[in-house]
Image (cartoon, helix red, strand yellow):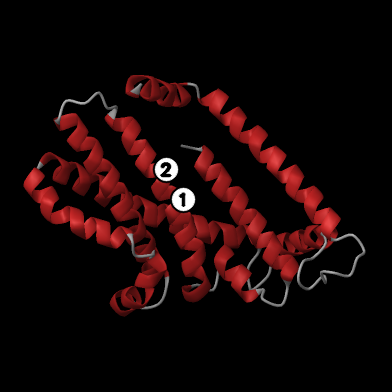
Amino acid sequence: QTQDIMSRHQLEYCEPSIWLWRRIVGAAFAFIVVTIAWYLVKLPSGLISDDALPTQTQVATAFNEVRSEGYAGATLARHAGASLLRLILGLGIGSSLGVGLGLATGAAPLTRTVIDPISSFFRMVPGLALAPLVVVWFGPGQAAIVAVVAMSVLWTVMGSASDARIAVVRGSTVDLPLELIGGMRSALLVAWATVLAIETVLASTGLGAMVWFAQERSDVIMVGIYVAGLIGFLLDSSL
């Protein structure tokens, strides 16, 4: 049974076109359902004001406004670019350290005995909770944001790499690169969520910052949510 599960898991990654089409169809169906529900909720009933939930037309107008004229001192492209840059830097640093430390600890049982409790502890701590301490170390700004993202990624990747390395050492039929990709995928989603969250408190640009500054513009908030969700979906589908 374990062999069958592993074969199906590997087949899913060996046939990326099938997996991608499933993702696209599922996402399209979900988008249609949400759009219809949104339209029905916003029918002239007076139950929900436009300030609480804007209409689809208002969101489309806000999208064009933010794209061309900008909001909170930057265009939509610049906000998205700032968030992606922080993601790349934080994910790159955290993943590099995580893979190296994970493979090293996985090959040495005694080291793992010492490191594993520390890794488990920090995996339970949200990256945003580390922000005040990181600001003390690096000061407010880009370096602090990247450091928080890297720290949130480090322990996730390290745990996956260590588990995969132990399985290889024990002679299990584990595809090490495939397991590392799985860990990277989980870390990628954690990193993106951390970027958006930390930008609300430490950044003046970025999708998270744009949404935070738009507290009196629900249409702009919805634009930020849609763009952030779309980027997250594309990132998740890339691995």
Residue 129: image location, x then y, percent = 38, 71
For the residue pair 135 and 106, the one nearer the viewer reads as: 106
- Count of labels in the image: 2
Q: Secondary structure at mark 1?
A: helix
Considering every residue shown, the one lying at the far front of the view is: 1
Tell me which corner region of the image, top left, top right, bottom left or bottom right, holds residue 55: bottom right
Would residue 31 be seen by someone viewing this image from the given angle? yes
Instruction: Describe residue 38's horizontal placement relative to residue 188 as left or right.
Output: right
Q: Residues within 10 Å of mark 1 (few under 14, many from 20)?
A: some
Q: Residue at x 37, y 43 (%)?
A: 184
Q: Locate the N terminus and report the quarter of the image it occupies.
A: top left
Q: Which residue is mark 1?
A: 189
Instruction: Describe residue 37's horizontal placement relative to residue 214 as left or right.
Output: right
Checking the image for residue 185, the label placed there is 2
Q: Secondary structure at mark 2?
A: helix
Q: Residue at x 60, y 52 (%)?
A: 229
Q: Residue at x 53, y 38 (%)?
A: 237
Residue 207: image location, x then y, percent = 58, 63
Instruction: Describe residue 18's horizontal placement relative to residue 43 as left or right.
Output: left
Are dots 2 and 1 in contact, CB under 8 Å?
A: yes
